[in-house]
Amino acid sequence: MKNKIIIIGSILAAFALGYFLSPKAVAPSQSADHQHDSINETIYTCSMHPQIRQNEPGDCPICGMELIPLVGDGDGNDNSLVLEMTPEAVTISGISTTIVGEGKMADNQGLRLTGKVQADETTTASIVAHLPGRIEQLYVRFTGEQIKKGDRVATIYSADLISAQRELLEAQKIKDINPALLEAAKNKLRYWKISESQIEGILASGKVQENFDIYSEYSGVVTKRKVSVADHLMAGTVLFEIQDLSKLWAVFDVYENDLGKISVGQKVSFTAAGIPNKTFNAIINFIDPVIRPDTRTAAVRATIRNSNGRIKPEMFVSGIIKSSIGNRKKMELTVPKTAVLWTGKRSVVYVKVPDAEVPSFEFREVELGDVVGDNYLIKSGLSPGEEVVTKGAFVIDASAQLNNQSSMMNRLVSIKDVPKPKDKIPDFTDVVAPFKKQLNDLAQAYLKLKVAFVKTDAQSAAHFAQAFKEQLTQVDMKLMKGDAHQYWMKQLKAMDAHAQKIAEQNDIKKQRIQFQFLSDAMINTLKAFGSIEPLYVEHCPMAFDGEGADWISSESVIRNPYFGSEMMTCGSVVDTLGQ
């Protein structure tokens, strides 16, 4: 919740900065000859994805539509990597910078982890009744009681045991004639876990005992009491569950990009929230071979001794692993974590442009190395002496996005690296009812197409894409005027083009790529003009190698069209329409 408030506040601050931002970006330094050549160079772009810029005609790498010449781009000065700000804007956003330099890695740096204490699963045990009967008395009074191996835990009455004792005594009388019968009678009692001393006591007294005691075979703390006095038991019924807490597990969550720094046998030092001013040490003895898909972490486990019982299961712990990274002595380039905007595959920093007439900040992609304390190692993208923004980077990025410049969500793209554009949606929800009704019919055609992708049925997808195109022709564009008409025509062109490409394909993977862009246009349309019926906008963060993709559904239950049965429930509801 706190992170959401920070992000929303930063975006609002970015809107305020709009009053102080220069309307154009500052171009990077270029030679006079290069600027002269650029004046007459024709730039081609996509009408649906304006961030696409190429020096020659062709097809859009995002949607495949034909590129068109860019109007008004002949000054050769349209580079959106640098955001120019006024001193007032810098003051409002509280921007501060740090000069990047080579610094020696401190010896006490290491990988910091969080986790909690868990019971050692190998020391969990159950105390069971090995013979049928009725509980006459319990000697374990409550959950949490400490018991030791050999302690009496219950007394039971068993009619079967009484019969077995009589057989034992009768066999004792004829042991000289048939010693095997006596041994068989003893084995029957041994099978019920009757001890040798108890058997000898029966033979010595010559009397049948009505009640027998049950003793614990393990030491530990009672974690669950499962019976009461007068309960009738079957053979094998669990009386108590116990846990030996003299040995526990410290389980830490480690992100997948940090797993390479950890190995079995490493030492981990940690503190527990409930035990102040005390540091514990343990050895890593297990690394979970499976990554949790929801958190992208793996469990790393260390066994800890707890003979005095101070450490309790479920305590939160904070640990540090002294990896080889933390012991480096050589000089390496680092930046504070606060300078980096992390977007999955890409990491971004903003570099202050030196000797600029007004404060200017350049969008820069960097390759991160290991985490070292509160810093990242920089593999590429920065040089010593450059000045990076360490406070206010998110505000600058949001301002750049609002100013239609390169940012985390919007950058100049190439054929090999295509981001998903995020356009501001206008509000035309006061449109006439007949138009909304036609959009509702279009949404129903879309939902049928979505179901085909959920079923991973390429043939059905092509069929319903054609039906969707036909439904598009039933929407009367004349019902819209002005800006609303122009916005509809833009979305109409996109939906028709992508539906056509789905209809022409029989490769489900290629169809799904087009379905992603068709879905974006459909979502834009329903957000702008409104929906009669309740609909859900759902998002899968794993689609297209982690780029993520959206779709529309008539129900909140996730049925993923980008993976089908492979990951049917991957995704979440991110927005609602028509509610």
Image: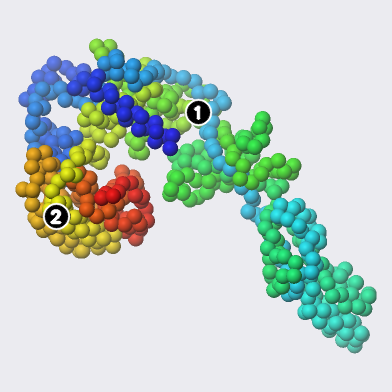
Residue, x 17% and y 57% (percent of image)?
441
Q: Position of residue 252 (x, y in %)?
A: 55, 42
Check the image and name the residue furthest to the bottom: 177
Determine which quarter of the picture holds residue 280.
top right
Q: For the N terminus, give its image quadrant.
A: top left
Q: Position of residue 437 (x, y in %)?
A: 16, 55
User: Could you tell me how far apart the alpha carbons at marks 1 and 2 are, in whole angstroms?
Assistant: 57 Å
Would you call the spot at circle 1 few (<14 residues within 10 Å), some (14-19), or many (20 or more)?
A: some
N-terminal label among 1 and 2: 1
Residue, x 26% and y 60% (percent of image)?
451
Mark linked to residue 354: none
Q: Position of residue 515 (x, y in %)?
A: 22, 52
Judging from the image, what secondary structure is the residue with disc 1 in?
A: loop
Can you identify the residue that label 1 sits on?
Answer: 373
Residue, x 32% and y 30% (percent of image)?
11
Give the residue type at disc 1.
Answer: Gly
Give the residue type at disc 2.
Answer: Gln
Q: Position of residue 534 (x, y in %)?
A: 27, 53
Mark linked to residue 438: 2
Q: Nearer the viewer, mark 1 or mark 2?
A: 2
In this rendered view, identify the residue nearer to me: 44 or 314.
Answer: 314
